[in-house]
Image (spheres, coloured by chain):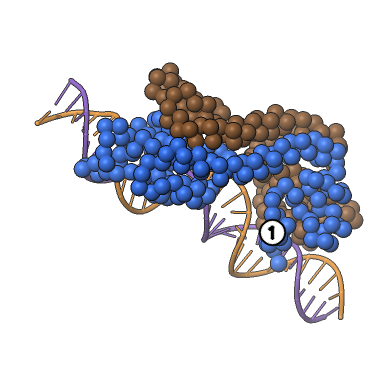
Chain colours: A brown, B blue, C orange, D purple
DNA sequence: TTCCAACTTCAAGGTAGCTTGAAGTCAAGC
DNA sequence: GCTTGACTTCAAGCTACCTTGAAGTTGGAA
């Protein structure tokens, strides 16, 4: 399994821009894998560079390591992922990214018109809606967070 | 300063969808303010609802409470912010949101073409570039993170 | 006036995502 | 063969952002 092109953790850190401590952490979390030299040092396959890039890109978009790990788990276990494998993975992520972009654009476009206009605490605002009538229908709360409706009460703490 | 329309922390929590514990935390962090009843209970002005909405919206976009606090600090101290005040604040945030959106769109559009095509660890990729030649020029690392260039080495840990 | 849910403070706990430090081992150049 | 920097593990620490629990107080309705 060892090749001349395997990377030490330091090389992987340099080339990915990710600290060695973070790489060990990713490995502990099963996001990346390594094999060991006879002297117990980690060696990473070149393909790991791509995995790390994916991890950082995904983190940038606000995904947790758990979610990223789940995505990466869809890649083949035994062999180096092919272009097709990565292509498949990125296709599955497209809707997620679309949603994120939409949410952000909505915020950007509404921030001025909505917070700016002062309707934020009033009726029928696409950005935020704590209106009492609507609340009676169970739709109070922040509309920017997807799926918030059923969480609003659960998020309360004091008795 | 007390009006009939002041909110208890529970009401603010219900109407904002934010836990009371979080609201107390925000107050401790000076993101929101309250006055007290004779019995030492918090009462919030209606306008606080708008502040909380702003805080959550901003968090959604990935901003820290420190950054949000700094933004909110630009609002007037003594009086209830006017539409104009909010308008001003949201205008200042526009570039930040634009940048976020752009970053996200870039990731979305490049993910397929770039990670998918396998160029991720090769030359001249807009998404990621650990190419050795470019690294020699000091441009290795993840290109998605703004201003990463000077951080790449600092992020390394092991000696 | 009594009751109890909603409040109060304070300290500790929790999760995510790492970083830091100690103490020791490996490997590659002189 | 020696030196030294890059590696190893493990435990503890750190920042952000809260949550939980204990122990006590308030306030509004019956």
Q: Is residue B152 above or below residue B33?
A: below
Location of residue C2 (image quadrant): top left
Residue A97 image position (x, y, % from top left): 69, 33
> In the rendered image, is residue B2 in sight?
yes
Camera-nearest residue between B20 and A114:
A114
Position of residue A41 measured from the top left corner of the image (x, y, whole percent): 77, 59
A62 or A84, which lies in front?
Answer: A62
Report the front residue among A22 and A144.
Answer: A144
Is A10 left or right of B87, judged from the image as shown? right
Left or right position of A58 against B29: right
Residue drawn where x is 62% and y is 44% of the image? B95
Circle 1 is placed at which residue position?
Answer: B151
Task: Please tell me in which quadrant of the rendered image residue B154 appears.
Answer: bottom right
**Quadrant (top left, top right, bottom left, bottom right) of the C terminus of chain A:** top left
Q: Position of residue A152 (x, y in %)?
A: 45, 29
Residue B22 placement (x, y as % from top left): 42, 41
Q: Which residue appears at 80% of the width and 35% of the height?
A: B112
Which residue is located at x 84 percent, y 57 percent? Answer: B134
Q: Describe the element under mark 1 as helix, strand or loop.
A: loop
The residue most toward the front is B84
Q: Residue at x 42, y 30 (%)?
A: A121
**Looking at the image, how many numbered discs can be counted on the residues?**
1
């Amino acid at each position: 399994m060892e090749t001349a092109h395997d990377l030490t953790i330091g090389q992987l850190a340099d080339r990915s821009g990710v600290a060695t401590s973070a790489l060990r952490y990713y490995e502990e979390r099963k996001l990346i894998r390594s094999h060991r030299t006879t002297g117990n040092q980690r060696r990473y396959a070149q393909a790991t560079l791509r995995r790390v890039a994916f991890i950082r890109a995904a983190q940038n978009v606000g995904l947790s390591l758990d979610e990223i790990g789940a995505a990466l788990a869809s890649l083949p276990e035994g062999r180096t992922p092919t272009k097709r494998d990565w292509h498949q993975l990125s296709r599955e992520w497209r809707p997620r990214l679309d949603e994120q972009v939409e949410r952000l654009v909505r915020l950007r476009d509404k921030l001025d018109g909505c917070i700016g206009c002062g309707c934020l605490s009033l009726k029928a605002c696409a950005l935020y809606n704590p209106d009492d009538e609507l609340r009676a229908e169970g739709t109070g709360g922040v509309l920017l967070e997807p799926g918030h409706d059923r969480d609003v009460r659960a998020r309360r703490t004091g008795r």
